[in-house]
Image (cartoon, grey):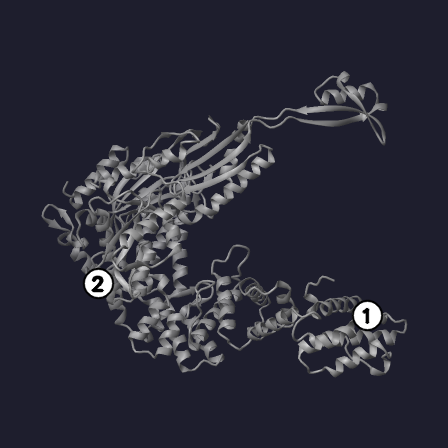
Amino acid sequence: MSSLTFQDTVFALKRYWSDRRCIIQEPYDVEVGAGTMAPETFLRVLGPQPYRVAYVQPSRRPADGRYGENPNRLYKHQQLQVILKPSPADVIDQYLGSLKAIGIDLSKHDIKFEEDNWEAPTLGAWGIGWQVMLDGMEITQFTYFQQCGGFDLDLVPAELTYGLERIVAFLQNVESVYDIEWAPGVRYSEVRFEDERQFSKYNFELADVAMLWKLFDLHEAECQRLLKLPGVVLPAYDQVLKCSHIFNLLDARGAISVTERVGVIARVRKLALGVAQAWMKQNEPKIEAVA
Amino acid sequence: MSLPFLLEIGTEEIPDWMIVPALNNLQDMFQGLLDHHALGGKVASTAATPRRLILRAQGLVERQADIEELVLGPSKSAGAGAAAGFAKKMGTTPDQLRTETTAKGEYFAFTKRTQGQATAAILARELPNLILKIQWPKTMYWNGKGSERFIRPIRWLVALLGDAVIPFEIRGVHSGNTTSGHRLLGKPSILVTIEDFEHQLKSNGVILSADQRRAKIETEIDGLLAGRALKVKPDPDLLQTLVYITEFPTAILGGFDSQYLELPQEVLVTVMRHHQKYFSVEDANGSLAPHFIAVMNTIADPDGLVRHGNERVLRARFNDARFFWQVDQKKKLADRVEDLKNVTFQAKVGSYFQKTERVVALVKEFGGDLNAQRAALLCKCDLTTDMVKEFTDLQGIVGGLYAKEQGEAEEVWRAVYEHYKPVSMDGPIPSTREGLLVAFADKWDTLTSCFKVGLIPTGSKDPFALRRAAQGLVRIVVEGRLPGPIKTDDAQLSEFLRDRVEYYFRDVRGFAYDEVRACMAAGWNVLTELEARLKRVQTIRATPDFEPIAASFKRIKNILKQAQFSDSAVHASLLEPGPEFELYEEGRRTEGQPLESRIAALRPKVDLFFDKVLVNAPDPNIRRNRLALLQSLLTEFSDVADFSEIVTER
């Protein structure tokens, strides 16, 4: 078969996981560095409630920007994130099935699971897992969450994070992500190149450092205020995400010294742990609360 | 009848480097189980792939032998009531008791018979615990909170004693006689017996034997390169990794555009080895060839898709490397020193900028010339380059290559290039004096500054690899012939270094442990000088007079210790003529002569002294003088070694 477009790959994966009883969510609308940080993962993995969800998450990493000049590196890439809580016993078979669903004939390729444990100190989170290698290329991060927000998890979720640009560039056999066919006749560069160029310029050269520090302080204070109030865990978590993104921006601007760095990470971590505690205290979170 | 046993623990992919230690641990524990429960039998073999640990044993009994033991009860004189109580406790009736006569009188007794249990029952009870007790560096849980931990989720269990399944369960996974084949090449569910297990797996895409997998990879590499005037760059560690990340390894040959050969070989090899797990290939002259060997975990690459995919990934990696090389050149190393303020060396210790300042000062203090000081200034600057951020194991090497490119003197760039050496116990140390000094100063600074803030290795925990740093430091000083002492006011660090020095001379250099201890007791801070003394003592030890005199020294030390005596001022007037005076005279006569000849001369005098002279003389003055004579002997030799530490036959 001819290879799928970028958007058809996304459709195929969403359909595949929808058929396996996942809620299909839309991307979270606050800047995040990875799909893990969206509340659909960070908060939903906590507590005893089973949950299954899949969503594309545009993930912003200011320091990875290359002004659109590097064929493989992006300031903002797209992850397809799947959370299966609790992880089913045949989770790896289900995962391999998803690769078939996007047109990978496994009998003609080489798949390996190589040790790669994941850790996010700012989220008090870590897990055990692998990078899944397809013909020598990492296509998915596969993690069994163990802790999140400092809590041992009641049910161990499997987290599958597909790097969409890499996978599709591979399937379409193009050397640069910008040459990916996004929709029939439309290239990735036509959709995204300008973001990469402009945001690289902003992140590395123009972002107002003093303003960012001020914003960081404001969002931190707002988070702390909200954490003292009942029933506003989700707005409080948005403030954590804001702080985290601002930290990444400051980092890309080279505005954080060694001594400051440890302290700032600790500040974000403290907020994230506070939110996780507040979430755990809430009784039986209802699905409507996020949807 | 003796029975064979087979255990297979089926899991999701276990990290390659953990597999062999876990197998050994499993083997030891299982043999312990057989022995403890007297089940007979020996572990016959173990095997593993990333998805399974296998243990086979032979010669197990079907059930334990019955045991008879005589249990003594109350004294006969205690009467019928006591006898009845004892009988009840033994689960019998008083008429079954017998009388046993001992030295203390007559007692009720009972011959208790314990019936042996079926081996299958014992194994069914013990195996779940044994499996979960296998030691791993890091474990996980995969069911609910507080549930079993293992390296990765357990997905199936095969446990057979002869033809029968040993039934047990680990959180929903029941043991049986069903295994699972290769994820892509085999069936997910295969009925097996002990006899056909290996064969069944083979026909389902799993080569059970690590040796066979290794041999397959090696043979195929030879086949791929045959007739091409190319040879593989040998890499036993990489081979071991590939053996344990595959169930059915198959080697393929790939290539890359020779334009990338313009990049330093170090960079290309690192990308291939560490990031892609490829073997590098060399031409007949030993230069890198534009080829690589990848090992798949599947049977074939019929359409060349796997080769194509791997080549594509490698091209992207090489493009990255080339991009980093070009970008990094825009800012010279020398202009990056300030940037080190933003690179953390260790959170409690500070930045690499501060470390650099200290290392430069140390190099200067140890007599490093301007080139050595320049190298010290530049040595950490590559930590700010994109190349090292991406390929961290190239730190130092990249700095050296950039320094060379940017016109630094050879003494400078080579020292930067080599300053992380030695990277392993038998890896080379830096090849130049400048390199040795920078490497020494870097490691010395790491040790002193970490110890200062309490980052001290304990047991198996050594997160900052300080043992390796200290071991490297010792090798640099001894083998690089650096003359200065290694000395510190930090008592803990001093003890730590002392251990490393002892380990080096004993386990790496092979000096006898008592020689090392004896020589180190006479001082160990100047390592080249310690090495010279060790060599001398090793030579003298082979001479016939050595052992006796060492024994005498031990005796002397004990006498002095008992007397709590340490004065060495001998008064000649108090010496008794004969053996005592002769020993004194011989000591004076040979003063200044080399150790080797003094030992031969003094030995008969010492022997005679101990034979004829009573050290513990009644007159306290004479006694004190004799002790002083002995002390002076010890002292005169103590700058070479403390010979009382030598283990002797006498």
Q: How many marks?
A: 2
* Labels 1, 2: front one: 1
- SS at mark 1? helix
Residue B470 as seen in the image, left or right of residue A83? right
Crowding near the residue tagged with mark 1, few <14, some 14–19, many ≥20 C-alpha atoms within 10 Å:
some
Residue B449 as seen in the image, left or right of residue B78? left
Residue located beneath label 1 in the image: B610
Q: Are marks 1 and 2 in contact (CB under 8 Å)?
A: no
Crowding near the residue tagged with mark 2, few <14, some 14–19, many ≥20 C-alpha atoms within 10 Å:
few
Residue drawn at x 79%, y 66% is B562
* Image location of residue B579, percent across then percent down: 83, 76
In front: B480, or A271?
B480
Q: CA distance from mark 1 to mark 2?
A: 80 Å
* Image location of residue B22, percent across then percent down: 47, 44
Which three-letter amino acid code belongs to the residue tagged 1? Phe
* Image location of residue B486, percent across then percent down: 55, 73
- Picture quadrant of residue B254: bottom left
* Image location of residue B197, percent across then percent down: 40, 33
Residue located beneath label 2 in the image: B258
Q: Label 1: chain?
A: B
Q: Is residue B354 above or below residue A10?
A: below
- Picture quadrant of residue B510: bottom right
Residue drawn at x 63%, y 24% is B115
Q: Is residue A114 visible?
A: no
In front: B189, or B243?
B243
In which quadrant will I find the N terminus of chain B? Answer: top right
Q: Earlier in the sequence, mark 1 or mark 2?
A: 2
Q: Which mark is residue B618?
A: none
Which three-letter amino acid code belongs to the residue tagged 2? Ser
Residue drawn at x 30%, y 78% is B407
- SS at mark 2? helix
